[in-house]
Image (cartoon, rainbow, N blue to C red):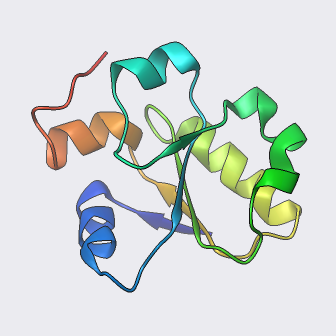
Amino acid sequence: MRDLSPTELKKYLADPDQDPLLLDVREPWEFQICHLDGSKLIPMGQVAGALDRLERERETVVICHHGVRSRQVAEFLEQQGFDKVINLSGGVAAWAQDVDPEMATY
């Protein structure tokens, strides 16, 4: 698993050759407040039951509020055979602080 800071992820996503799944593992109420454009919501507690909806070969960026839940999910995904997993360090809170100050926060 790799960790990317928000600024590193922004640069990574700007590359048209990259098309990772942005997997947001927060709760629906959190996702409604703010999220990265194009992200897919699967709350942490539902990830195990949704593995068949995820592509093991596709690079997956796991996102949460501060980076703790996403790290746990990223580690779980690796244990399930996903080998292209990235954790967004600091989560959407750091994204709002470092990349998108207009993003709503909570």
Of 93 and 23, the residue lying toward us:
23
- x, y (%) of residue 80? 88, 62
Q: Would residue 34 appear left or right of 66 to someone viewing this image?
A: left
Q: Quadrant of the N terminus?
A: bottom right
- Residue 76 spot, x, y in % from top left: 80, 52
Query: Quick check: 105 above or below 89?
Result: above
Image height of 26 relative to 50, above or below: above
> Which quadrant would residue 54 be assigned to in this image?
bottom right
Give the image location of residue 53, x and y in percent.
79, 52
Q: How many marks?
A: 0
Q: Residue at x 22, y 23 (%)?
A: 104
- Against 79, residue 40 (above or below) is above
Tell me which residue sits at (25%, 73%) in the image.
Answer: 14
Q: Residue furthest left?
A: 102
Q: Would you place residue 22 above or below residue 45 in this image?
A: below
User: Residue 22: image x %, image y %?
Assistant: 50, 54
**x 35%, y 43%: residue:** 36
